[in-house]
Image (cartoon, grey):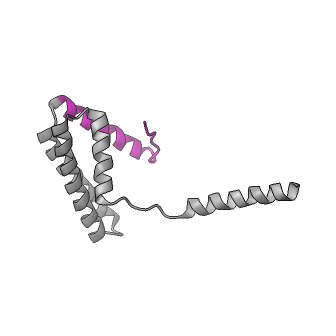
Amino acid sequence: MKKLFVAGIILLAMATIVSAQQPRQRMSAEESAKAQTERMEKLLSLNADQKTKIQAIDLDLAKQWDAKRQSVQGNREAMTAARQEIEKLRETKYKAVLTADQFKKFQEDREQQQAQRGQGGQRQRSN
């Protein structure tokens, strides 16, 4: 009985290790845009018109990011520059859609995320 129990524990541990080592699948541009829009909807209390516009912005930027990421793959500096370019575009486009209060909240959230990334990427997710 003990041998069976130990074997079960070992099997469970091995399954956990194997699943932890599998590479994560990247989200498609559509999935990424949807997740970003849902996050902004919760954070900023978007109305229906704003949600539609933000969704279109997020989808466009996600597609641009995918294309840029492919073209600069392996070049860390170029990826950072591309990411910053996309984020500047996001800021410009969001500013045209959001109210002043919503945009301020968006900027504060983004600054908080950047600070958390600067602390080794340890960030807490709120559900």
Q: Residue at x 33, y 60 (%)?
A: 28
**Residue 115, magenta (yes or no):** yes
Q: Residue at x 30, y 49 (%)?
A: 34
Q: Position of residue 70 (x, y in %)?
A: 29, 69
Whether residue 115 is visible to the viewer of this picture, yes or no, is yes
Q: Position of residue 88 (x, y in %)?
A: 19, 49
Where, by quadrant of the figure, is residue 8 drawn? bottom right
Where, by quadrant of the figure, is residue 42 drawn? top left
Q: Is residue 109 above or below residue 9?
A: above
Q: Position of residue 14 (x, y in %)?
A: 68, 62
Q: Quadrant of the C terminus?
A: top left
Give the number of marks. Answer: 0
Q: Nearest the camera: 89 or 35? A: 35
**Residue 8, magenta (yes or no):** no
Q: Residue at x 75, y 59 (%)?
A: 10
Task: Spot the residue most to the left.
Answer: 96
Dominant SS in magenta: helix
- In the picture, measured across the screen, residue 114 lies left or right of residue 103, that is right
Q: Nearest the camera: 67 or 31? A: 31
**First to last magenta residue range:** 101-127
Q: Nearest the camera: 114 or 86? A: 86
Task: Spot the residue most to the top.
Answer: 101
- In the picture, measured across the screen, residue 96 lies left or right of residue 118, that is left
Task: Spot the residue most to the right.
Answer: 1
